[in-house]
Image (cartoon, coloured by chain):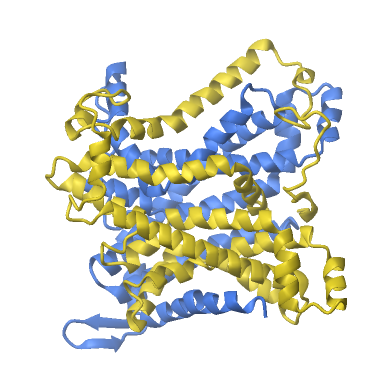
Amino acid sequence: MFVAPHLVILTLFMIVPTGYAVYDSLFTSKLVGGTRFSGLANYRTVLSSHEFWDGVWRVLLFAVVQVPLTIAIAFFFAAVFDAGVVRFGRFFRTVFFIPFAVPGVVAAVMWSFLLLPGFGPYSKALKSLGFGHVDFFSSKLILPTIVLIVIWEWTGYNMTILYASLKSIPRDVTEAAVIDGAPLRTIILRMKLPMVRPTIVMLVFINMVGALQLFTEPSILSAFQPQAVSYGFTPTLYVYNTAVGSGEYNLGAAAAVVLALIIGLVSLGAFAVRRRNGEFR
Amino acid sequence: MKRSTSTPSAPPKPPKPRPDDGAVPVRLYGLRRGTTTLLTLVCAGFAVFILAPLVWLLINATKTQAGVYAGPGFWFSKPFRLFQNLADLGKDISGAGVYLHWMQNTLVYAVAGAIGATALSALAGYGFSRFRFRGANSLFYLVMATLLVPITALALPLFLVYAKVGLVNSIWGMILPSMVSPVGIYLMRTFIDASVPQDMIAAARIDGAGELRIFFRIALPLCLPGLVTVLLLSVVAIWNNYFLPLIIFSRNDLYPLTVGLSSLSQAAETGTQAQLVPVLIAGGLVTVVPLIVLFLFLERYFRGGALRGSLTG
C-alpha cells in the first residue's frame, strides 16, 4: 500500500516509455509512405554508423582517463583530511564540495569563457607564461578540456563519500598501526585504501555510468566552438541530434536503446565484481 | 557494508569536540614540519582551482561585453554594470526567452518535484522497511535496478510517449518523472530501519492506531532529518537537470534555468547582440547562488545524503 504510489509513477514514467522506445525503434517514418514496420533496420543503421561508434569509443576513452583521475585526486584529499594533517581541513572540505551545487550547464559556460582561445584569462595566462597559443577547443585538446571540467565538477562529491567511508574506520585500527611505527603513507595506502575498496568500486561504477552519458559539457562547448564537437561526439549527443536535430525519432530511439544496453553491460560488470567480492548484500 | 554505521544524526562525540573529532593526534604520525605545510599548500592550490571560476563569474557579472573580453579576467573593470545586467534578466533581450520566467519554472519544478519525490520515497521506504509482504525483496531490487537506467537513455522514450499522450510542453511532463527517486527510497528505508523502533510501531498497533496514523504521527516525525536530506538532494538533482527538459520542452517560456541558459549561451556566441554575454554571466551567477547558499547552510544534510548514497548498490 505504501509502495504503490511510487510504483505507479515508476511504471508510467520509466517502464512504459522504455517499452515504447523499443517498440518505436522497430518502425521507420518517411515523409512519403508514412510509418511502417521495419524490424531491426534502425539497429543496423545505428550499429553500422561510424559516428555512433566513434562516440562510444570517445566516451570510453574519456571514462578511462577521467574516472581514475577523479577518484585518485578525491582519495588523496579524503585521506589527507581524514588523517587531519592539513590546517583548515574543514574549510577545504566545504570548498571542494561546492561544485556539486553548480549545474553542469553553468560550469561548462564558466569554463568556456575561462579557456576561450585568445580571450579567456587562462589562455592569456598560458601565453604570458611562454606556452604560446594554446587552443583548448582544438580537436586535440577538447577531450582533455572536458576531463578538466568534469574533474572540477565531481572531485568534491567523490571526496566527500570517500571521506565518510574513511571516517568509519575504527580509530584503534589506525592507532595500532601508528604504535607499530608505520609511516602515514603506508597507513593510508596499505591499510586504509584496501579498507575502503568497496566504496571505490561503487564510485568507479557511478562515475563510469556518468561518463558514458556525457552530454551537457560537450553540448555547451559546441556553442562556443561548433567545429570542435561533432554530430556524434558522444553517444548521447548522437541520440539527441538524430532525434531532435534531424527529427529521425525512430532511429534516435534505436540509438537510445543501444546506449542503454551498453551502459547496462557496464553496470552488470560492476555488479558482478561486487557480487564476487561478496559486497552486495 | 554495515548498515549500522549510517546514523548521521548521532555520531559518537568525544568529550571535547575538536575540528576533526575522533582522529588520531597528528603529532603521532611523526611527520616532518614541512609536510603539513606542503599538504596545506596543495589543498590551497586545489581550492583556488575550485573557486576561481566562481570568483570569475561574480566579477564578470559586473562588466560590459567589451569588459568581459578585453579587461583582466579576475579584476573589475569600469563601468560597473551589475545592476543593469541583473535588470536585463527580466527582459527578453535575446529573443530566446526571459530569464526570470526560467527562474520561476525551475523553482516550480524543483519544489513540486522534490516534495513529490520526498513523499513517495518516504511512503515507499516505510513500506519496504516495515512490511514483509510477498515479493517485497524482489520489488525492492526492481526499484533499485532503476538506478541503473541512465536518464539520458530515458529522456527520449519519455518524449515519444509524451508526444502520444499530449504531455509535450506540459509542466507535469517534467515534474512527475522527477518524483522517481530510487536513491531517496534507499535513504528513507535505511533511515527508517535505523531510527524508527519496531517496538514503538507494535505498541501503537496494539493501542489501535491505524497504519496511516502510525506513519504520519510516529514514523515521519522520527525521520525528519532523513526527509530533509532526500528533499535537498532532489532539489539539487532537479535544479541541475538539463537533458530531460531540453528534450521535452519546445516552448522557451517553459524552460528551466539550465536549458534557458544554454539557449542564451547559444544566442550569445552565435548572435551579434553585444549585450548578451554579460547577461549570460549574470544569469549564471543568479542560478548558482541560491544552491550554494542552501548548501552552505544545510551542509550536514548533504553530507548525510552523500554518506548514505555511498552505501547504495
Please identify the residue farthest to the top as the structure is shown: B33
**Depth order, front residue of A105/A158:** A105
Q: Please determine whether, in this image, residue B112 is positioned above or below residue A220.
A: below
Q: Residue at x 40, y 34 (%)?
A: B54
**Depth order, front residue of B219/B272:** B219
B164 left or right of A269?
Answer: left
In the rendered picture, chain B carries what hue? Answer: yellow
Q: Please determine whether, in this image, residue B139 is positioned above or below residue A70.
A: below
B239 left or right of A50?
Answer: right
Q: How many marks?
A: 0
State the image coordinates of residue A55 (x, y, percent, origin top left): 36, 56
Give the letter of the blue chain: A
- Viewer can see residue A66: no
Q: Residue at x 36, y 57 (%)?
A: B104
* Figure quadrant of residue B277: top left
Q: Please determine whether, in this image, residue A227 is positioned above or below residue A135.
A: below
State the image coordinates of residue A98 (x, y, percent, origin top left): 50, 39
Q: Quadrant of the C terminus of chain B?
A: bottom right
A40 left or right of B17?
Answer: left
